[in-house]
Image: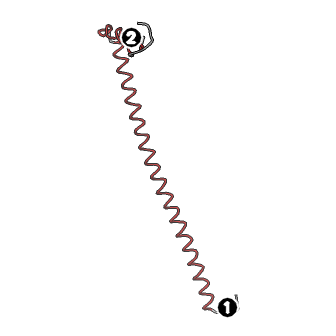
Amino acid sequence: MRTLSLRMKLGVGFGTLLLILVVVGVVSYASLQKAVELSIMAGDKDRAVIVLRTIEARVNDQKAEVRGFLLDDSRQEEVGALCEQHSHPRRHIKGSSYPH
């Protein structure tokens, strides 16, 4: 190191700092790109969760409405007709071999 001139020592020091700066820049850029990808994936996942919860809420609403319909005493005739109609579904299909 003593044989190097001051100009060489400054050049090596500056080159080392420049190399470190480039490495930090590349690592930062790669990390930023990964953060953007993760952010996009999280947004997609959030949208999927919202859609799933909306579907689940609608199914629960339908179940409650069906339960209310079945428990309504004023509609027992309709419920009986629906039960009878759906107890033998093949008889409603044309060409079925089910005995009528």
Where residue 96 appears, as percent x and y from the top left, is 42, 14
At x 49%, y 53%, the residue is 38
Residue that mark 2 sits on: 83
Residue 90, above or below 18: above
Horizontal placement of 4 versus 48: left or right? right
Where residue 78 appears, as percent x and y from the top left, is 31, 10
Residue 66, above or below 16: above
Number of the label disc, if any, that sits on residue 4: 1
At x 58%, y 81%, the residue is 15
At x 41%, y 43%, the residue is 47
Q: Secondary structure at mark 2?
A: helix
- Judging depth in this view, the residue of 25 and 3 nearest the camera is 25
Where residue 18 appears, as percent x and y from the top left, is 56, 78
Crowd class of label 1 (few under 14; some 14 to 19; many from 20; radius 10 Å): few
Q: Secondary structure at mark 1?
A: loop
- Judging depth in this view, the residue of 98 and 5 nearest the camera is 98
In which image quadrant can residue 70 be found? top left
Q: Amino acid at mark 1?
A: Leu
Specify the farthest residue to the left.
74
